[in-house]
Amino acid sequence: MLPDDGKHELSNRCVELVSLASGLAGRVHPTLRASIGDLVRSMNCYYSNLIEGHDTHPISIDRALAGDYSKDPEQRNLQLEARAHIEVQRMIDHGEAPEPVVSRAFLQWVHYEFCRRMPEELLIAGEDRDGKPVKVIPGEFRRQLVKVGRHIPIDADDVPAFLARFEQAYDPSRLSKVEAITAAAAAHHRLLWIHPFLDGNGRVARLFSHALLRHLGVGSELWSVSRGLARSKETYKQLLMAADADRRGDLDGRGHLTMAGLQEFCAYFLDQGIDQVKFMEGLMEPRELLRRMEIWTEEETRAKRLPKGSWQLLREAVVGGSFPRGRAAEITGYEERQARTVLGALLDLGVLVSPGPRTPVRLGFPATVLERWLPLLYPAMPSR
């Protein structure tokens, strides 16, 4: 259940991940965290779905969150899938999920909340012997034998017993902090190896990992391990498969799982976490973020797509985290009416956001500005 770490290679990675994640959290204004959290949930959704072969453009994801769905049935289904993922992660981030994270109750909750939001067309897991579609029931463990590539998971009747052992072995209260973080990496593989649900196991596993790392105080809404897994998708899948094998090279998952394979997967998983925290730290470095935003704002203002005075408000949202609407005139130096016009233009674009008409405004990260403000966050894609 846990990898051997005699040379402390994994524990050293855990210490580095904790240090980097704490540093990132300490550098971000508390109010700005909410805006980054919205952004990272969309990013996590995009990359997690990409691993499954579902490529949903970030602008399409933004539109789905606004209730603007494509008329094309396939695109609409992908938008609904993306929205489902984001809503479930938001619930996790807001503390609305069952505890403990390693429990079968949590796993069933994630699967249920995700699948019940999905279109029926995406809840079909092949056909039975009579050619009838096999439907995925939200929150229900599988009742049949399945095959995933070359891996044949455990019998369906054994799923509850294996998940009971899973909860016991990966219970953070039984482990040291370093052991618990290593366990989070191991649990990611073991959950996929058990394959408790008929379909949707990949998304459940990645949401589970997000929740567990968050529970351990190392994960947060500021970074996503899924981006690293997706950017090295083939390695991710190969190492998952390698950790399925036993010492005889058997890939049916029936023998003793190889320790070397589990060690290698855990090292890879932790390395992806370290890499992604470093990436987000560089991307969110205040001076560089402000520089990129200022260049964009100047260009948009010259093109008359933004009113003058926009930069002052955007800068305040980064530096101060948020500001009351009534301060727009003071910040821009304009008369009240003109300042409201500038503020309204930025709210319409989504670069400033506010929960209500009388609440403070904070920075927004709409997909339309991401390539300029936060380059390399997503692969370069043509606009749609």
Image (cartoon, rainbow, N blue to C red):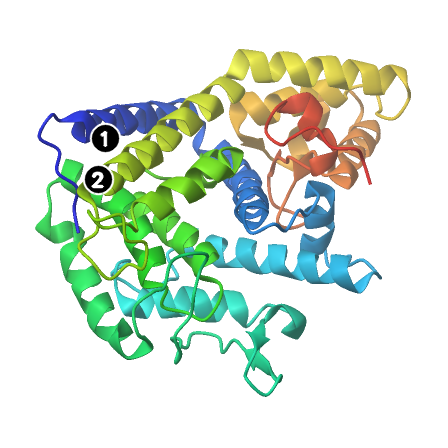
Q: Residue at x 57, y 60 (%)?
A: 84
Relative placement, left or right, of 349 versus 165 is right
**What is the crowding at mark 1: few (fewer than 14 residues within 10 Å), some, or many (at least 20)?**
many
Q: CA distance from mark 1 to mark 2?
A: 7 Å
Q: In front: 87, or 122?
A: 122
For residue 2, the mark is: none
Residue 195's spot in the image, x, y percent?
Answer: 37, 64
Mark 2, secondary structure of its residue: helix
Q: Residue at x 25, y 75 (%)?
A: 158
Q: Residue at x 21, y 61 (%)?
A: 166
Residue 299's spot in the image, x, y percent?
Answer: 82, 15
Q: Residue furthest right?
A: 304
Q: In front: 186, or 361?
A: 186
Q: How many numbered dots are placed on residues in this image?
A: 2
Q: In front: 143, or 29?
A: 143
**What is the crowding at mark 2: few (fewer than 14 residues within 10 Å), some, or many (at least 20)?**
many
Specify which label sits upstream in the sequence, 1 or 2.
Answer: 1
Residue 65's spot in the image, x, y percent?
Answer: 67, 54
Kindly tell me whether residue 94 is visible in this rendering: no
Q: Which residue is mark 2?
A: 182
Amino acid identity at mark 1? Cys
Q: In front: 107, or 312?
A: 107
Q: Residue at x 21, y 40 (%)?
A: 182
Relative placement, left or right, of 57 versus 300 is left
Kindly tell me whether residue 99 is visible in this rendering: yes
Query: Does 211 sit above or below residue 222?
Result: below
Q: Do residues under tags 1 and 2 come within 8 Å of each other at their CB atoms?
A: yes
For residue 14, the mark is: 1
